[in-house]
Image: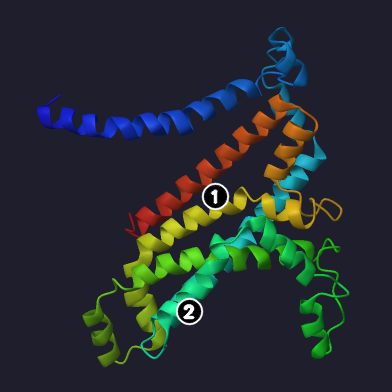
Amino acid sequence: MTRQERTGWLFSAPVLAIIALVFVLPTALALALSVTDYSIYALADWSNLEFVGLGNFVDLLSTPLFWRALGNTMLFAVLGVPMAIGTSLFVALLLNDATVRWKPLWRVLLFAPYVTSIVATAVVWRFLFNQRFGLINRALGAVGVAPIDWLGDPHTSIPAILIFVTWKIFGYNMIVFTAALSAVPVDLMEAARLDGASRWGRFRHVTLPAIGPTLLLATVMSVAGFLQIFAEPYVMTLGGPAQSTTTVLYFMFDEGFKWWNLGQANAVAFILFLMILAVTIIQTRIGRRHEWL
């Protein structure tokens, strides 16, 4: 090892140590506990802890509620990521236009929901979605739409939560996209405009390649976030109605802190970790194919 390489490792060592302590060690412990029957009895006396091998994973695969939670989580991710990313990018493009005035004010107002308390805002939105008194149903009633039981109907509970989640988080990605759009080469944009390229053509062939790495990063973070969605359904619907908003993380919370099946909860956590890792690897390969990495 050369002196330059040793210096590089020396500077990287603190960061690597923190990563190992915060990410690697908890993951290893979760994997270790997932192959045991770790429960409230083992908390009182470690002699009650037994090795069960893949028993927790086998039990999970034969649990209908786990599959229901997995399906709900996938639905949240499949619908929520395009909603959040699309809304963020659309608003960032609007605010990037030269004709828009008071841009700093709009950015602050639109970013504000991201820094507000998720529990407080979820409670407010629960009242907005109220079937009898909610402002959303009142607005729909003004155009002749019958009241909708947003949070009490299994068919509308997930869309209602997705609307809230998109409102809550899109401001963060909007700021990221705004920073990326400021780096789009102006001369290329002007050249495309002089060549007669349409607005869509300029976005596809100039803007999109320039913000590709940022778009990939926002997508990776959003997918990981939606696969770990928990607080929103917990506050707004308690996983209902009819378990229609029970997610994998919600299922893990119940197993770990409601039923004290901590071994099985760790098995759920490890499966979720593998899911996020697999999706991130796929997204990374797609990004490399488009030369965004």
Coloration mode: rainbow
Q: Vertically, is 269 above or below 192?
A: above
Q: Which quadrant holds the N terminus?
A: top left
Looking at numbered disc 2 in the image, what kind of residue is underneath it? Trp
Residue 138, quarter of picture: bottom right
Nearer the observer, 182 or 189: 182
Residue at the far top in the pictured view:
47
Q: Residues within 10 Å of mark 1 (few under 14, many from 20)?
A: many
Residue at 74 percent across and 33 percent down: it is 257
Looking at numbered disc 1 in the image, what kind of residue is underneath it? Ala
Q: What is the total number of numbered labels drawn onto the structure image? A: 2
Q: Which residue is mark 1?
A: 224
- Residue 199 lies left or right of residue 166; in this view the side is left
Residue 293: give x, y in percent of width and height. 33, 54
Secondary structure of residue under mark 1: helix
Q: Which residue is mark 2?
A: 106
Whichever of labels 1 and 2 marks the residue nearer the N terminus, that label is: 2
Residue 271: give x, y in percent of width and height. 62, 36
